Amino acid sequence: MSSNEEIWRLADQLRARGDLITLHDLLREAKNQGLTVSFDTVAELAWKTERLELLVPPPLVRKTISAFLKGQTYERVLDPWDRLGGLIRLANPESVRLSIVYNSLYQELFSAIEDNSDIQLMLGNPIEFLDKEVTYWDLIVSCPPFGMQRDKIMIRAEDSKETVSDSMELLLLLQACTRLSTEGTALFVVATRFFGSNSFRHLSSIGIHLEAIVHFPPGTFAPYTYISTYLVVLRRIDVPKLAFLAEIGSEDDIQPVIHNMTSGRQGKTLELGSYVNPHSFKSFRSLRLSRDIHQYSRRMNLEPVPLASIAKDINQSNGKLEEGFEDLPDAVYLPIIGKSDAVTRLSDLKLKPHNYVQIVMNSEKVNAEYVARFFSSELGRMIREYHQIGYANPRILVSSLKESELYFPSIETQIELINAQNEITELRAMINSIEQQLWNKPNDVEYTLKSLKNLNRESGFEEWAETLPFPLASILWRYNAESDVRLKKEHLFHFFEAVAQFNTILLLSGLKSDSSLFDAQREIVFKDFKKESLYRSTFGTWIVLGERIAKLIRTEMGNRNGRERCLKVFRSGRSDLIDSLSSKKTFEVLKRTADFRNKWKGHGGIENEREAQKRLSVLESELAALRELMVDTYAGNQIIRPENGKLKSGIYHIQVYSLMGTRQIFKKISIQMNIMLDSDRLYLYFEGNPEPLELLPFIKFKFGQSSEENACYFYNSLDKSGVRWVSYHFDKEAEFVKVDNSLEQILESFFGYN
């Protein structure tokens, strides 16, 4: 067997010729030079050289299947759609193993790999082979391509024959299962569409049952596809009506999930294992949404209300009517595609009528205006997403909507809420009117200021500050408590700089938590950067990095699978925080304030009191703009620091400090986690999620001898003496230097040096 170094040296030689290198080219040249290649090397090469087709399932999938097969013995093993032997080689080598490849190219690649010689190889159409095959197989394992063209096959179900139409990879699964031995097992990697397919519905007619479903999150197969995928376990023997369901997002999940699956044990969390009706299962995303909806409604102390119990009718649009619907009282118009708001008036429709359904409410049980606003709230949007089907253009089916549950307070409370909302609307109209008056009649500014006296800005500002993480809220507290104009201005500059650094650290932590996503986007994020350029933390550096990551996140959030992946990497059940962190408008505010700092620092004159007040007013305008963008940003999220924990029944029960708000006495809360947390690290925790997001260590928190000495520090610079940390709120020890080799390693990892 050749060393990896020899193979990679050969790849560099071929690349130096300027030609596009394929795995086929490399293996052919290796064979000409008398080099043999291990499968592990081939797998790594396939992921680096091939971009058009998945030749080898990713390591996480292979390791999961390997763990499932460990200790199992099968006499006959088949992979009906193989390429390079990536899955069939996981079976016991003493088995009779047959791989089917569909063209001569893969036959050549297959034979060039070390240790594939004892696997029988057949070239041809696997469906035709299976249709004629008389052998029964004890293990069938395969990962056929996703989203192949539709076709038809004839299957024998008991004494009859049936024609099944479906995508080709699912027909292959169905056809292969007809050749499963009496006590055999089939392991297939499939996309979400499998669970609603014709092939799935026909499995029971040939005596095949779904025993287990393992979800691999979006991005597992990146860069080939970012869709959710599943390992399904199928058996001919009778199995319980419920199927085991779990998620494997990293190698650490494999052993706990496989243990729970094989022992028939339900895990402590949804991800570690639960049992579902396979015939009503839609997707892991839907199940997670259902859990998040339940947790969200519990936090709001709301009980479920079946929509059918409060709606008189649910009508689809009528093309014969000019406006699409008959204008009925107590009607709510709900978009069945997209994320537009629900409305109560036909004149307020933003989409074409056929993209809505009309829900006529029972006014004795519910307020139509409240229902419309509910459907436009975060909880309402989660429910809407839960009932969407389809992948490219998801939409809500009326049949699904009729079975939905909503979460409402009493009708009396609904009316009070609508009245409160009306007051807010009136207040907003008053503010708009005062604003117009301010600029239309500039000489009446004193009268305009008097109009504002009834609006309690100070109280609202303090309430907002308490919703922010302590690293930011503590700076706002210093600003708000300060009376000196120049110092207030400096505190605001510190706040904007801290927001740029803090937001970017959160974005970078999320991106780096998904290694495949990070590796794919590394060059874009750190273009024109060197690790030395990050040895000094600057306002501009954090803005540039943050803008680049935010743009990537906005692109991911723009499609359904990408959104699911982002929620996964940020360990969140809601998009509010992700949307705020990646907001283009947020970075526009930060860029303006950075420009002000550069401009005013470069001003050679002395800053008098009048000039300082002018500059403070400018910054306070930017603060107001940022505040509007960050309202309720951290709802449901907390920055936490672990104190201690213990393992009980497979779940870690951990006491943590909640580092939120302006106060230096921090609330202790108890959370349940799938993993143990590092007491020296900070985490972003979304309530109810069993795994928080570990923040990259560019922010430190130090507990003092008293609560008044509790302080937060931001990374400032790195040199030979160590890492310099600065605090924007703690005067007693505003900075310190400490040797920290791990931070330099993290900076190197950004550029692929690790």
Image: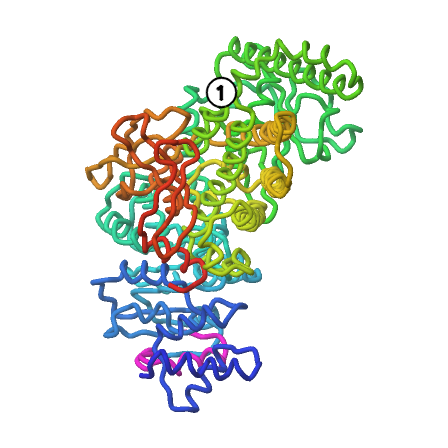
Q: Is residue 368 above or below residue 650?
A: above
- Amino acid carrying mark 1 in the image: Glu
Q: In terms of depth relative to the viewer, which is nearer, 735 or 98?
A: 735
Magenta residue check for 635? no
Regarding residue 242, the answer to whether it shows in the image is yes
Q: How far from the left and from the top, in percent, is residue 192?
A: 47, 50
Report which quarter residue 618 is drawn in. top right
Q: Residues within 10 Å of mark 1 (few under 14, many from 20)?
A: some
Q: How far from the left and from the top, in percent, is residue 293?
A: 44, 31
Q: How far from the left and from the top, in percent, is residue 383?
A: 51, 32
Magenta residue check for 102? yes
Q: What is the basis of the colouring in this image?
A: rainbow
Is the C terminus in the top left, top right, bottom left or bottom right quadrant?
bottom left
Is the N terminus in the top left, top right, bottom left or bottom right quadrant?
bottom left
Q: Is residue 749 above or below residue 353?
A: below
Q: How far from the left and from the top, in percent, is residue 112?
A: 39, 83
Q: Is residue 378 left or right of residue 77?
A: right
Residue pictured at 56% horizontal, 10% vertical: 415
Q: Secondary structure at mark 1?
A: helix
Q: Is residue 95 left or right of residue 327?
A: left
Q: What residue did someone put label 1 on?
A: 462
Q: In terms of depth relative to the viewer, which is nearer, 166 or 60?
A: 60
Regarding residue 387, the answer to whether it shows in the image is no
Report which quarter residue 337 is drawn in. top right
Q: Is residue 300 above or below residue 101?
A: above
Q: Which residues are magenta?
A: 100-120
Q: In terms of depth relative to the viewer, which is nearer, 606 or 545?
A: 606
Q: In terms of depth relative to the viewer, which is nearer, 194 or 464?
A: 464
